[in-house]
Image: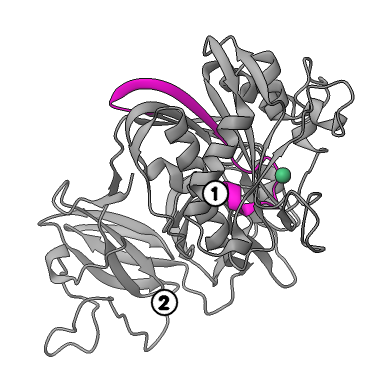
Amino acid sequence: MGNQFCRDLKYIFRIVFMFFLLWVVFPVHVHGHSLSREIFFEETDHQLEVIRIKGEEPGLTVLIFGGIHGDEPGGYFSSEILPRIKLIKGNLIIVPRVNFPSIMLNRREVHGDMNRKFVPREKPDDPDAEVVKVLKGLMKEADVFINQHDAYGFHRETYISKMYNQYRYGQSLIIDCGNFYSQKLKKQVNLSVIGKRILERVNRQIKNKDHQFGFWDHNSVAKNTKFPEMKKSATYYALTTYSIPAFGLETSRDLPTLYHKVKYQLVVIKEILREFGLEFIPPSPTVATPVLYWVEFLKNQRDIIRVNSNTNLRLAPGDKIVIKKIFSNSDWGLSANILNWGSINDVNKEFVFEKIKNVTTILVKKNHLSIGKIYLRNYRKNSVREIILEVNGEQKRIPNWGKIDLRQGEYFKILKTYPEFPNIRFDVRGFSVRPGKRDDSDTEIYPKDLIPKVFV
Ligand SMILES: [Zn+2]
């Protein structure tokens, strides 16, 4: 996928006021090749994002679920990277954050274990029911299914130690039955043979023997299975209801870093895709440290304001704010929670500010990771509320943190603040004070005079 930076696209410059400071940002555009993103239950806590990637040539469709358990980041971080694949043959359907509320809270489950809810009929009063219904629908479209997890220890055929034994789930590929006739693929599929072959190739790529994968047939289709609870799992449902090969893919929670989990998830997925005839150039398993740039709010249903991370947004009683958009180096899995108000994710909800004793915090997250905070506080006597500008000959009042768009050839000039303060100085970021001036006010400033600030 990759964010692409289009310098000359529009000549539109966005200028952000930060107290008396300015900087310029160029618009960023995303180019995808036959990639689509669909969002179900948008603006609810259980928002569900589905990514479909079509290869250049037809082939099987592999469905991948990440984050069915919220405290298993190997799954949901790797399935975010997977859309960077270049798919030549076959198709992918990726659901990176199956259980978004549990991811935001970094808990295995919120409304009970979602991986025990794949039964013929969902409970109507279950808050996860409509999500599970969509997920089942996706299984119907697929030819192969992978459910991603992280678990403790390292699975081995025999008992080696407390961490390496036949009871541990980490670093394992799990199937529900060894051999079955797939109605969907119209052939006999020996999952046992296929699974072992996949892991042979996987383990050849993992030099550290301690990190290699073990194979595990739960045989949960059998009446006397040792894992009867798996009869309610997603892989069991995909295999028995839609007659497609299904794999539980577990990396270990005991790997040293998130990077290891992501890397190993992607190695196994890569080999499963190869096994089923997909052709592709795999993505590199880079996990960028998430960074919050700013949060965009709609204030009093009129002004767009953009507030930097870890700063105060000062408000008057009765001011209304709506969190509109989070700007980060990633646009996946972002949420903002106004603490002690609303729900886990308060994006697009109207918050009416009342005079407060101390502070109300907005916590911004990517997946389970906190990436920044914005503090809501009362106006003080010396708070600047507005900056009064001349824009192309017209006077404009811009709220603090507000934003104006300028085209090439248009200018702005800083006049004063509201309220006015004595001895105030204006400093426009990326602009040098003109000779003979004490600061940047009362100067016509054009976008071309500014040093651009670029985010990639
Ligand atoms: Zn799990």
In this picture, which residue range is highlighted in magenta?
54-79
Residue nearest the viewer, comparing 60 with 32: 60
Say which label, 1 or 2, has the lower sequence index.
1
Residue 187 place in picture, x, y as percent? 54, 12
Q: Looking at the rendered structure, which numbered label has been put on residue 330?
A: none
Residue of label 1: 265
Residue 401 lies in what quarter of the image? bottom left
Residue of label 2: 420
* Crowding at mark 1 (Cα within 10 Å: few <14, some 14-19, many 20+): many
Residue type, mark 1 in image: Gln
Residue at the image point whose x is 59% and y is 70% from the top: 379
Q: For the residue labelled by badge 1, is the local secondary structure a helix, a strand or a loop?
A: helix
Q: For the residue labelled by badge 2, is the local secondary structure a helix, a strand or a loop?
A: loop
Residue nearest the viewer, comparing 309 with 316: 309
**Image quarter hosting the N terminus:** top left
Residue 451 lies in what quarter of the image? bottom left
